[in-house]
Image (cartoon, helix red, strand yellow):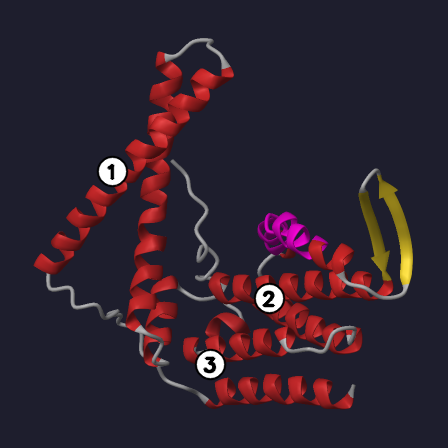
Amino acid sequence: MEHSYFDEYSSMDSFIHRLEPRIKAIAFFALIIFIVLAPQGSFFILGAYTAVVVFCIFLSRIPLAVFLRRSFTALPFIAAMSLFILFARPGRPLWAHSFGPLHLSISYEGLTGFFNILLKAYLCILCALLLAFSTNFIHLLKALEKLKVPSIFIMVVSFMYRYLFILQDELEHMKQAKESRTVGGSRWFHARALANMLGVLFVRTYERAEEVYLAMCARGFDGTVKTIYDFKIKPKDVYFLLAVISFLFLARVGA
C-alpha cells in the first residue's frame, strides 16, 4: 500500500535542504512565534512574514502544488474555529440578520479577527510543512534532541510517525475484510460494524505498541535518537538564521 510520507522530498538538493537541521528548526520556529505574536490587523507585518515563507518555499525547490495540496486539508478546521471570532466579536456592524430567536451579526473587528487568525494559522502550517518536507525525519528528531526538547515529546512523535502508516494498513485490511463479508444492509448495521472495527483496532494498537517497545528494549533502545549525520554548523547557516531573525525584527519594528 502506498503512503505519502512527510519527508519524501527531503532528498532533494536546494539551499533550504542543505541547511543544518538545528538552524533550520530554530529559524522556522522563530518565524512561527513572530507570526503568532503579530498584532491583530497588522496585515503589513503579516505580508512581510508571508514574503519570507514564500521566498523559503522558492529556495527549497519543492513544487508549490505540494504545499497547497497538503495545507488546504487543514483549512476547513481553521475556518471552523475562526467562525467563532467572526460572529462573536463586538464592534462596528457590517451585517446583521435574525433567524427567529437567533440573531447573527458581523462587525468590522470580527471580520478583521477572522482573516487575521486564518492567515496566521495558514502561515504556521506552511512553515511546519516546509521544515518537515526539507528535512529527513530522523535528522529532525536528532536536531530537536540536541536543542534540549524533552525526550518524551521526541519519543512520542517518533513512534507516532513510524507506526501511523502500519495502523493505516491495518485499518484498510479490516475495511476490506468487512466489505468482502457484508453485502447490503442498513446504515445502522454499517455504523455498528465500523464502531466494532475501531474497538478492535484500538486493542491491536495497544498490543502492537507493547510488542514493539519490548523488541526495541531487547535491542538496546535507550530513548535517544542515533544517526550517522554529522551535525556541523557552517557560516552560511549562521548567516541564514541572522538574516531571517533580522528581517522579522525589522518588519515588526518598522510597521
Give the x, y percent position of residue 241: 54, 85
Disc 3 crowd rating (10 Å Cα; few below 14, some 14-19, many 20+) is some
Residue type (three-letter) at the residue carrying disc 2: Cys
**Callout 2: few (<14), some (14-19), or many (20+) C-alpha neighbours within 10 Å?**
many
Residue nearest the observer in this picture, 21 or 198: 198
Name the N-terminal-most of marks 1 and 3.
3
Hey, what amino acid is under mark 3?
Answer: Ile
Q: Nearer the viewer, mark 2 or mark 1?
A: 1
| Residue 137 image point, x, y percent | 38, 63
Spatial CA distance of label 2 from label 3 is 17 Å
Closest to the camera, between mark 2 and mark 3, is 2
Hey, what amino acid is under mark 1?
Arg
Quadrant where the N terminus lies?
A: top left
Q: Position of residue 178 (x, y in %)?
A: 36, 20
- Residue to which mark 3 is pinned: 23
Residue at the (59%, 66%) spot, across then down: 124
Q: Which residues are magenta?
A: 66-83
Point 78% across, 76% down: residue: 42
Q: Is residue 74 left or right of residue 46?
A: left
Does residue 69 show up magenta in the picture?
yes
The residue carrying mark 1 is: 204
Secondary element under disc 2, as helix, strand or loop, is helix
